[in-house]
Amino acid sequence: MSERIETDVVIVGAGPVGLFAVFELGLLDIKAHLVDILPKIGGQCAELYPEKPIYDIPGFPVITGQGLIDNLLRQIEPFKPTFHLGEMVEGLESLGDAEHPRFRITTDAGKVFECKAVIVAAGGGSFQPKKPPIERIDAYENTGVFYAVRKMEAFRDKRILIVGGGDSALDWTLNLQPLAKHLTLLHRRDAFRAAPDSVNKMRALVAAGAMDFELGQVVGLKGPAPTLEAAVVRRDDGSTFEVPCEVLLPFFGLTMKLGPIAEWGLNLHENLIPVDTEKFETSTPGIFAIGDINWYPGKLKLILSGFHEAALAAQKAHRYVYPEKKLLFQYTTSSTSLQKKLGVVPDTRKQPEAV
Ligand SMILES: Cc1cc2nc3c(=O)[nH]c(=O)nc-3n(C[C@H](O)[C@H](O)[C@H](O)COP(=O)(O)OP(=O)(O)OC[C@H]3O[C@@H](n4cnc5c(N)ncnc54)[C@H](O)[C@@H]3O)c2cc1C
């Protein structure tokens, strides 16, 4: 029998943006349940780059992916969100009307939620790394070939070959170079999609002899599987050479699999959900889309953009959850009632006498 849960809002996705939505909803007395396919909280930050530093979170000159998620969890703790991890939201059905929306959400674990608003914070959907077409690559996966860096320490004193020319390849080149025994960056051409600053830093390391940069493509792997010993690289002119390595990190981007979201009857724009920029609501009243999953002119896929979107979506969600209440805008620092919710000041209201 399926489990039935009634709540104010269901948040699809427990990445950084879904987590911050809990905070913004909580300030408005709105309760949330979060569902995520991954078995852990934190979306891309926790899954793809827990130890990579992030430099563009306001108020934090530097923080790691996991550090940010840990802080967000501390920040939303007063609102006691419920997490449903390792579960995919499959079905989303509208029950009410535009003025009084209600939704039924079903997960692949058989749970059924009924709620007044839905916040889709599903990032790129379920993201999967694009694998390079190298014969027998599966035989080395998770022993010599990794598509994400979960623990930098695992690569200490290893000979590392990083392949790619985007931000992930360059970020990990700069972060892993200090602890690698030797690091080589390999790219098809001497032009990069990554941030110019990262490319300049990489070139400076190459000039100082601290790492190598090679042109070419990996066409084969050597070593008694699952132990990787070298990668065979082919240059543009057809000649080949070997790069000795115990670790190969191919960063060829992620395939974003939208999954069941495509079946929810929402308008889509190239696998993203278009929203207005006033309340980040989708084509269906009561369903909001925030973070990497949404699209609007000028959208930047940055965590800080998602935080702003969460704040505005929560204001509109309040109208659906409490149609009879007027919402007054308040700062957390100037409202004692908000501070009580956050546990910053003790609740001194007189408690009813025990009888
Ligand atoms: C290597 C790398 C470095 C980056 N560096 C920075 C940086 O320095 N600064 C910055 O601002 N941004 C950075 N980003 C981008 C940043 O990580 C994203 O903008 C951010 O994670 C988006 O957050 P989100 O919560 O919208 O989505 P996500 O983090 O993608 O989380 C979405 C969650 O939704 C879940 N989900 C999807 N579909 C369903 C479903 N049907 N049911 C249940 N769960 C579902 C997914 O499993 C996932 O956990 C970086 C990204 C990468 C890959």
Image (cartoon, rainbow, N blue to C red):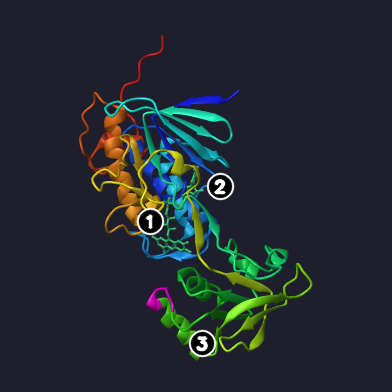
Residue 61, compared with residue 271, is above or below; it is below
Q: Amino acid at mark 2?
A: Leu
- Label 2 element class: loop
Q: Amino acid at mark 1?
A: Ile
Question: Outermost residue toward the front?
Answer: 238
- Whole-angstrom CA distance, mark 3 to mark 1, is 31 Å
- The chief SS type of the magenta part is loop
Q: Tell me residue 194's x, y (percent).
A: 42, 73
Front position in the image: 267 or 282? 267
Q: Which of the 4 image quarters holds residue 31?
A: top left
Q: Which residue is mark 1?
A: 303
Question: Do callouts 1 and 2 mark residues in contact (Cβ within 8 Å)?
Answer: no
The yes-or-no answer for disc 2 within 8 Å of ligand 1 is yes
Residue 15, compared with residue 65, is above or below; it is above
Q: Mark 2 or mark 1, which is nearer the start of the sequence?
A: 2
Residue 137 visible in the shown view: yes
Boundaries of the magenta span: 192-197
Q: Amino acid at mark 3?
A: Val
Q: Quadrant of the C terminus?
A: top left
Q: Which residue is mark 2?
A: 38
- Whole-angstrom CA distance, mark 3 to mark 2, is 37 Å
Q: Tell me residue 281's x, y (percent).
A: 30, 41
Return the mark for residue 206.
3
